[in-house]
């Protein structure tokens, strides 16, 4: 986009404003479409996390925004709930499991103390532990790690 804009500005100096106008309008629409997509939860996976769009879907969504479609009309088509797959341990018995901590966690989830955990109690517990799946478009909790060993 920046290269297209720069080339248009250089061409404008040679041939006048009429030569650059279509390119500058297009790059402006492209930039606005990309920003609109990201701000409204239609960003790419590399920046938005696992619930983000593939590059191909992102390009398609931006193209539809450039064509004048509303972001609200695109959300149902492109947003999806992405639930990460959790690899559960296959072993269910043994010394490595802390039974007392498991009981304590269950008791914390069992808010009314009736010996069972309802869906509502389970949901509240997941939210309290900050491990509940998030809705598409919500701000994910992310961690950025930078190391001197990382390639530049």
Image (cartoon, rainbow, N blue to C red):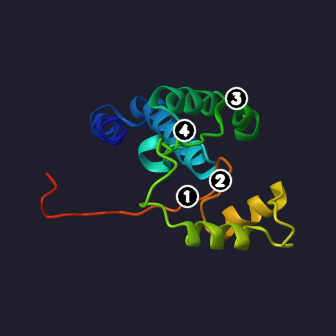
Q: Gap between marks 4 and 1, in whole Å?
A: 27 Å
Q: Where's residue 22, x and y in %?
A: 48, 30
**Mark nearer the N terminus (1 vs 3):** 3
Instruction: Report the residue marked by disc 1.
Output: 140
Q: Gap between marks 4 and 2, in whole Å?
A: 30 Å
**Residue sitting at the far front:** 94
**Mark nearer the N terminus (1 vs 2):** 2
**Mark nearer the N terminus (4 vs 3):** 4
Q: Gap between marks 1 and 3, in whole Å?
A: 21 Å
Image quadrant for the N terminus? top left
Instruction: Report the residue marked by disc 2.
Output: 134
At horizontal 50% and vertical 67% (from top left) the residue drawn is 98
Mark nearer the viewer, 1 or 3: 1
Q: Mark 2 and 3 residues: CB-CB less than 8 Å, in contact?
A: no
Instruction: Report the residue marked by disc 4.
Output: 29
Q: Residues within 10 Å of mark 1 (few under 14, many from 20)?
A: some
């Amino acid at each position: 986009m920046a290269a297209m804009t720069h080339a248009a500005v250089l061409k404008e100096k040679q041939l006048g404003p009429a030569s650059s106008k279509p390119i500058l309008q297009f790059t402006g629409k492209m930039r606005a479409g990309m920003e609109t997509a990201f701000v409204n939860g239609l960003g790419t996976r590399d920046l938005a996390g696992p619930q983000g769009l593939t590059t191909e879907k992102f390009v398609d969504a931006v193209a539809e925004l450039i064509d004048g479609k509303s972001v609200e009309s695109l959300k149902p088509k492109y947003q999806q709930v992405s639930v990460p797959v959790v690899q559960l341990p296959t072993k269910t018995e043994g010394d490595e499991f802390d039974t007392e901590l498991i009981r304590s966690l269950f008791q914390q989830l069992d808010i009314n103390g009736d010996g069972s955990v309802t869906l509502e109690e389970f949901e509240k517990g997941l939210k309290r532990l900050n491990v509940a799946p998030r809705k598409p478009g919500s701000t994910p909790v992310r961690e950025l790690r930078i190391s001197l060993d990382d390639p530049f």
